[in-house]
Structure formats: C-alpha cells, structure tokens
Image (cartoon, rainbow, N blue to C red):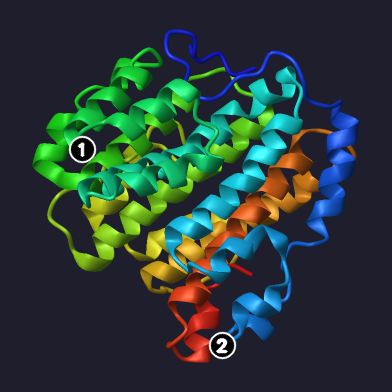
Amino acid sequence: MFTGNYRSKEILEEREEGGYPAEYLLSRIKGKRISLITDWEPLIGDTALLESLGLPRYKELVSETSAASLWKCLLAGYRWVYFQMEKPLRDIFRPFFLYSELRTLFFCLRLRAAGEGVRIEQMLANSLFSKELRKTLMQSADVREMLEEIEGFFMPLSFRFRGLKDIYATEGFRGVEQHLTNRYLEFVMDSDLHPVIREFFTRLVDARNVIALYKHLRWELKDDPYFINGGSIKASRLRSILHREEIFEVVSLIRSLTGIDVQIPDPTGVENTLYKGMTRFLRKKGREVWGPGLILDYLWRCSVEAMNLSIILHGKDMERDTLKAELVL
C-alpha cells in the first residue's frame, strides 16, 4: 500500500464509502477496452477525424481540439475508474492518479499566467483533486501565489517539494514542471508500493532518465541533466555514459529496457520506443486474470490513445509517413 501522508492537506478527493468489488470493476474494464482505438491508419490525415471517431468520451473535442480539452477527456475516464474502486484498491493506485494529475497543475499554472482564470474551473471539472485544492487553484491571484499554495499541499508528503517559487523565478514553467515531476517520482520510489505499481514507476523513471541522457548527448548540451533516483539503471552509470559521450550505449540501454532493437533515432524515436516498451510490459500484466495489472494496462492504453490523438490533431499538415512514425503503436 502507498504510505504517503495525505492527511495534512488532502490532495486527491477521498470517499471512505462507495466503490465496487474488484471483480466487477475488472469486468467493466474488459468491456471498455474493446472501445479503445487500435487501428490508427484510417485516422491519419482524416479531415473528418472527430466525426469519424463516434466515441462519446471525445465528444468535447468536436467543439475544441486543444490539448487541454483532450486532457479533460482523459481525466474523465480516469475519474470513472478511480471512483469505481473500493478504498483498498484506490490506495494502491493513488500514486498513479496523482502522477497523472501533475499535468493538470501545469495546465492551471499556464492558464493563470495567461489571465484565463475562467478556464481553470473548466480544466478542474474532471480532476481528482480534492475540493480544497480545486478551490485554491481557482482562487489564486497569480502564478506565484498558486505555486505557494501547491507547495503547501505537497510539503506534507516530503520536503523535496519546497522552493517552487524560486525555481519559477529562475527557470520558468519548464523548470517548475521538471522539478515537481522529478521530485514526485523520487518520493514515490521511496514509498511502499504494490509490486506492479513499483515496476511501472521504475520503468517510467528509467525512460525519463534515458530520454534526458540521449537529448544531452544528441544536442551536446552544456549543463548535465538531472537523473531521477529510483530507476533500475543507476545514476552513476548514466553519468558515466554522459561524460564518455557514448551515444551508442543509449541504444543498448533502450534495448535492455524494451526488448526492441533500434538504430540511433531522433529524440522522438527514442521516446516512442520507450513508450512501446512500457506498452509491451503492461499488456503482459493485463493478461492476468485478476489484479492491478489489468487496470494499469487499461489506464495506460487510455493515455496512449490520448497521446496519439494529440499527435494526429496537431500534425494534420505533416506527411503521412512522418506522422505515423510519431504514433505509439
């Protein structure tokens, strides 16, 4: 069970009662998996994409094809799963859902900076954040105040989360997003997790570290990347590859993590291959008759579906083969 302290200030919404037995939820998810998009060929370059989907969960995209709108659609699906769970199962999955909601925070910060406070309430409509946190995000006067409030909610988990305002002042939004994500992943990896959830986050940390390593080698960046602690690949090994400038060793790392042979691809290809490796791992876990693996596989498939839709929506003017290469298939 995840042992993070959420009681000082609740971050995620809680319901002590409610939910359904795991067997019932698993049967519902098996049914929902059938409606996930598996054949992407007809949608690549389809100018009538939204109408051709015919999926109720994406009806909002018909009027607004933005990244925020797509994210809200994904959150609605996550929210359904979260509240179908009985509390013991929610406890197992809480690290995953809170990790997902970090992106909601990032959307809210950028909306506040753009003076679009009204849209923050719309963004939070499907969020799993507690009522207290949602209210705080909507009422924050500016980005700095919002960051101070966010820090107040996360600090009871770990002192790792302090200093968000200072990071924003020196590194902007990108710095805040990287800091909060990296520190959250390290916090999770120091927690007591269900084995399947732990392996998921271990692979996620490995993927983010390998991507950071590859980008620094490929673009010959001066500042060393931050390697997240807790992955299966030690930070010392990653730093050794970085300092030796051995970009071909990255290919070996990717192969060991995913089982997929790759050449030296572009950064998009590296990310794509690592995501495919995660998909392979979770599909294997999803074949289990019972357990968190099937649920986690479904949640990951939903996120990949949203990711691919985003690529298609924003790459409609790209060459068909180029667009297809960016999809996680």
Give coordinates of residue 215: x percent, y percent: 30, 61
Q: Is residue 71 left or right of residue 121?
A: right
The image shows residue 267, relative to residue 280, as above or below, that is: below
Residue 102 visible in rendering? yes
Q: Is residue 128 left or right of residue 287?
A: left
Q: Nearer the viewer, residue 107 or 217?
A: 107
Could you tell me which quadrant the C terminus lies in? bottom right
Circle 2 packing at 10 Å, graded few (<14), some (14-19), many (20+), is few
Q: Is residue 30 left or right of residue 273?
A: right
Separation of marks 2 and 1 at Cα, in angstroms: 37 Å
Q: Single out the residue that lies furthest toward the top.
A: 8
Q: Nearer the viewer, residue 278 or 19?
A: 19
Residue at 55% across, 29% down: 95
Residue type of the residue flagged with mark 2: Thr
Give coordinates of residue 252: x percent, y percent: 48, 59
Residue 263 visible in rendering? no
Residue 288: which quarter of the image? top right
Residue at 41% across, 25% down: 133
The image shows residue 250, relative to residue 1, as above or below, that is: below
Circle 1 packing at 10 Å, graded few (<14), some (14-19), many (20+), is many
Element carrying mark 2 = loop
Residue type of the residue flagged with mark 1: Val
The image shows residue 16, relative to residue 266, as above or below, that is: above
Could you tell me which quadrant the N terminus lies in? top right
Give coordinates of residue 139: x percent, y percent: 30, 30
Sequence-wise, the earlier of marks 2 and 1 is: 2
Give coordinates of residue 19: x percent, y percent: 78, 25
Q: Which residue is mark 2?
A: 47
Q: Which residue is mark 1?
A: 143
